[in-house]
Every structure is written in C-alpha cells, then in structure tokens.
C-alpha cells in the first residue's frame, strides 16, 4: 500500500510536458520577450516614442514666452533621445545628444534653429506677432522633433550609437524627414486646435 501511495504522489512526467519545456526554452525575461509582451516590435515602439514627443514638442511650442518655449522644446527632444537609447539599449549621454541635434539643425540653415528662434521671438510683437508665433512654432518644432527621432531610429537600427553618430553624414536623411513631416505635423496641429475650438 505504501508503495502505491508514493507512486500516486510522484509528479507525472509525460512526453508532452517534456516537449513543451523544450519548445518554450528558457523562461528568463529578455528584451525580446518584453517587446513581444507589449504586442509591438522595437521599431514600432520607437516610432510611437517619436510620435508622442512630436505632440509634446508642439505643446511646448505653444508656450507664450519667447525663449522659454525653445528651452522646453529642446528638453522634449533630449528626453525623446533618452527613451530611444533605452529602447535600443544604448548608453545615453546628454552632451553628445545635444551636440548632435544642434549640428543637424545647423544643416537646415535658416529653417532650423534660426527659424524656430525667429518665430519664437515674434511672440514679443503684440497681437499679430504673438498669434503668428503660437501657430508657427508648434508646427516647426514638431517637424524638427519628428526628423530628429526618425534620423536616430535609422542610425540605431543600423547598429549605431551616440558615440559614432555623424551629423554631417546624416543631414541629407534629416532634411528628407523634415520635409516629409510638414504635412502630417500640420494636420496634427489642425486637429489639436480644432479639438480646442481654435481656428487656424
């Protein structure tokens, strides 16, 4: 009787359970497994991160105080690169990121840093200038943020890091992304303003 009892209490091991163990493999949490749990690939997550920060940059561009809006927009873009670096498991260095972004902007000429600063300073002008600044800065800052994000995603997808990022090499791609973002960001801004009851 004792023998039968011990046999009954012994855990059953079947070919099916053994095959299931072999099929599932190790149960350690890996970056790939974490991504699969969200239902999104790493690239899809990165693109979502960029889109979220485009909205944030557009919101920062609405700030009524000149220069303050520029500081806020820069902060949004650096935070975006910080999150992208984390998603791609790349060490983030704010100094390198800041220099890379500024260098990309310089490559755009007057449309880059100069354009955002110019429209931001328009907010000093009563009524007309303030209105122009509030409408233009969000769109341009959104376009710049989109282009920065997409450029770094392409670089990270190719196995690059912040250390080997070469802004001069990436400027043509950055310009292309900046131009392609104009229509989509403008539509995003119109939808946002429409929801708030603002006519543009």
Image (tube, rainbow, N blue to C red):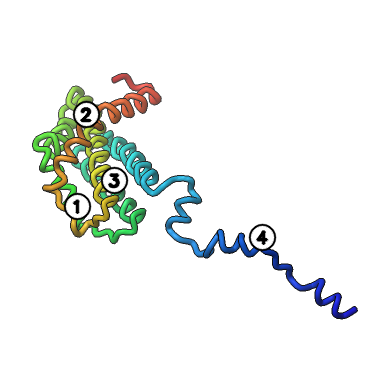
What mark, if any, has residue 76 been given in the picture?
3
Which mark lies nearer to you, 4 or 3? 4
Residue at point 16% right, 37% down?
175
Q: Position of residue 185 (x, y in %)?
A: 29, 30
The relative height of residue 136 versus residue 166 in the rendered view (above or below) is above
Quadrant of the image for the N terminus?
bottom right
Which numbered disc flags the more N-terminal residue, 1 or 2? 1
Question: Which residue in the rendered view is the most extreme toward the top?
Answer: 199
Q: Quadrant of residue 181?
A: top left
Which numbered disc flags the more N-terminal residue, 1 or 4? 4
Instruction: Quickly name the residue at label 2.
Output: 136
Q: Which secondary structure lies at badge 2?
A: helix
Instruction: Quickly name the residue at label 1.
Output: 98
Which mark lies nearer to you, 1 or 4? 4
Question: Which residue in the rendered view is the most extreme toward the right?
Answer: 1
Q: Which secondary structure lies at badge 4?
A: helix
Q: Could you tell whether 160 is left or right of 53 in the image?
A: left
Q: Quadrant of residue 200?
A: top left
Q: Which secondary structure lies at badge 3?
A: helix
Q: CA distance from mark 1 to mark 2?
A: 23 Å
Instruction: Quickly name the residue at label 4.
Output: 16
């Amino acid at each position: 009787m004792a023998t039968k009892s011990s046999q009954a209490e012994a855990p059953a091991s079947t070919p099916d359970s053994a095959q299931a163990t072999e099929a599932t493999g190790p149960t350690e949490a890996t970056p790939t497994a974490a991504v699969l749990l969200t239902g999104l690939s790493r690239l899809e997550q990165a693109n979502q991160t960029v889109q979220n920060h485009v909205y944030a940059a557009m919101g920062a561009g609405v700030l009524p105080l000149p220069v303050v809006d520029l500081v806020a927009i820069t902060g949004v873009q650096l935070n975006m690169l910080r999150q992208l670096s984390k998603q791609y498991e790349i060490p983030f260095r704010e100094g390198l990121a800041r220099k890379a972004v500024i260098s990309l902007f310089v490559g755009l000429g007057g449309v880059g840093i100069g354009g955002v600063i110019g429209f931001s300073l328009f907010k000093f002008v009563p009524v007309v200038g303030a209105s122009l600044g509030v409408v233009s800065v969000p769109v341009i800052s959104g376009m710049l943020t989109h282009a920065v994000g997409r450029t770094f995603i392409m670089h990270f997808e190719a196995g690059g890091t912040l250390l080997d990022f070469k802004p001069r090499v990436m400027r043509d791609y950055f310009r292309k992304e900046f131009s392609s973002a104009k229509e989509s960001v403008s539509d995003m801004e119109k939808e946002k303003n429409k929801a708030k009851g603002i006519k543009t």
